[in-house]
Image (spheres, rainbow, N blue to C red):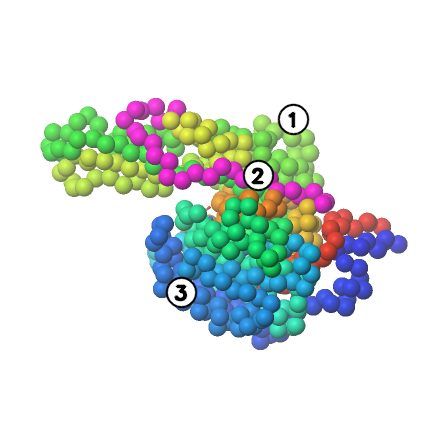
Amino acid sequence: TVPRSKGLRDAEHQRASRIPSQFSQEERVAMKESLKGAIQIPTVSFNPGEFNTTALAEFGEYMHKVFPTVFRTSFIQHEVVGEYSHLFTVQGSDPSLQPYMLLAHIDVVPAPDQGWEVPPFSGLERDGFIYGRGTLDNKNSVMAILQALELLLIRNYIPRRSFFIALGHDEEIVAPGSISAGVRGTWGSEDLSPPPGKGCPARLHVDEGSFILDGFIPSLKKPFAMVSVSEKGSLDLMMEVNMTPGHSSAPPKETSIGILAAAVSRLEQTPMPNMFGSGPLKMTLQQLANEFSFPANVIFNNLWLFWPLVSRLMERDDITNALVRTTTAVTMFNAGIKVNVIPPVAQATVNFRIHPAQTVQEVLKLAKDIVVDDRVQFHVLEAFEPLPVSPFDDQALGYQLIRQTIQSVFPEINIVAPGICIAQTDSRHYTNLTTGIYRFNPLYLQPQDFSGIHGINERISVQAFETQVKFLFEFIQNADTEQRPVSHLHEL
Ligand SMILES: CCCCCCCC/C=C\CCCCCCCC(=O)N[C@@H](CCSC)C(=O)O
Ligand SMILES: [Zn+2]
Ligand SMILES: [Zn+2]
């Protein structure tokens, strides 16, 4: 017989207090309409200090309207942080259990209309999909977290383990992270020892930053869940060339624009070194090895021999290339004042996403060695080192809770693997709060969907959003365990 593992709870306890994640048709319609309403509020953040404050304020009111039970429950404290971020403290019945945090962000990147099949802030539903900026990044999570909590509370749920919901309004800009600053402010200074009643520093975080990945690796036919246990670093580098302005009828051999354009071109044409094998990717692929068809399964089971081939193959695709190296993206170029004036200044901004095997300083030096032109000045606008790898062994509560919830909500997914987030998340502001930082959005993502994130036609299927609510509904209850989860049930 299958030994009855204590698992997260013994069966009796689970049956007595477990609330099934089944929603009425009315609740299902209401949750998708709530998401549409959230998308219609253009909470765009442009640059540091440049937000749509009217929309951010409107969103705060909107949350009160669509989640009334959350806001009137006595054991839930709501605080506005930094004017437009929101921190919910959900007080559990067992203060001995360390709390956890669920992170999401309200702000979205701008979305010019061109290229969109529907207006980017319409929230229109078409062919089973809800379209709009923020449907994947990251209003889906904001609404799914609060929706799951609302549905639990309506069903008289009382958590045992306290938890925090931190909804930031400035994730998409280079900022100190108002919500994390607010959390520090609420809980005390750098040591983050919270005042009485706030519970201990959080035990784990769950944020955006990975998905159930489907179709990202050729010859891997099955989708798999990748839980990002780290994230790449970033370096925003502004390069500048200054020259004496003058009449364009007698130009110098090179203008500031020409000098900078050549420097930028050298950077683009000289990729950073391929670091395959010196980050979490190799571990991800080893866990996936037996899911590949022949001969890929032989290759991935023998990376000691085939790693040069694999590292080259990974470079071919922009997304998998981002896993093996520090990426270089020239994202801004500003220069020139008038067609008949030699341009006094040219500026270009390069966004590097730093591989975990490199540091900010190493990338900066490599960039200077590639540009090799003293006329180009380097200005570091912002930099973050790659984040440490969070634990994902059998004893890592956060990772195992996510894994367990994936297995119950997505029974068709038989691989849950640790990985790295190629982008940045707000979780980088919380590294001194916990080592258990995990990034996972319980959604299927295909390469064409990824192009919608910060791109055009960002969309989420109605079904996927409903399943995301279900995941959080289950996760919050699973987190109530007082025991470490058993990550592997004994097979017959
Ligand atoms: C081995 C398997 C293949 C792995 C494929 C990975 C596919 C991509 C998966 C996840 C990417 C995460 C994207 C969502 C999160 C984006 C968050 C974001 O936009 N952050 C901003 C923060 C700006 S801070 C100034 C960012 O620009 O990174
Ligand atoms: Zn984003
Ligand atoms: Zn995001």
371 drawn magenta: yes
* Residue bounds of the magenta highlight: 369-395
* Coordinates of residue 245 in the picture (x, y in percent): 16, 33
**Gap between marks 1 and 3, in whole Å?**
56 Å
**Circle 1/circle 2 CB separation < 8 Å:** no
Query: Is 164 within the magenta?
Result: no
In the rendered image, residue 396, in percent from the top left (x then y), is placed at: 68, 46
Of helix, strand and loop, which one carries label 2? loop
Marks 1 and 2, Cα distance to the nearest angstrom?
28 Å
- Residue 485 visible in the picture: yes
Query: Which label lies toward us, 1 or 3?
Result: 3
Residue at mark 2? 388
Mark 2 and mark 3 lie on one chain; the one further toward the N terminus is 3
Of labels 1 and 2, the one closer to you:
2
Q: CA distance from mark 2 to mark 3?
A: 35 Å
- Tell whether circle 3 marks a residue whose Cβ is less than 8 angstroms from ligand 3: no
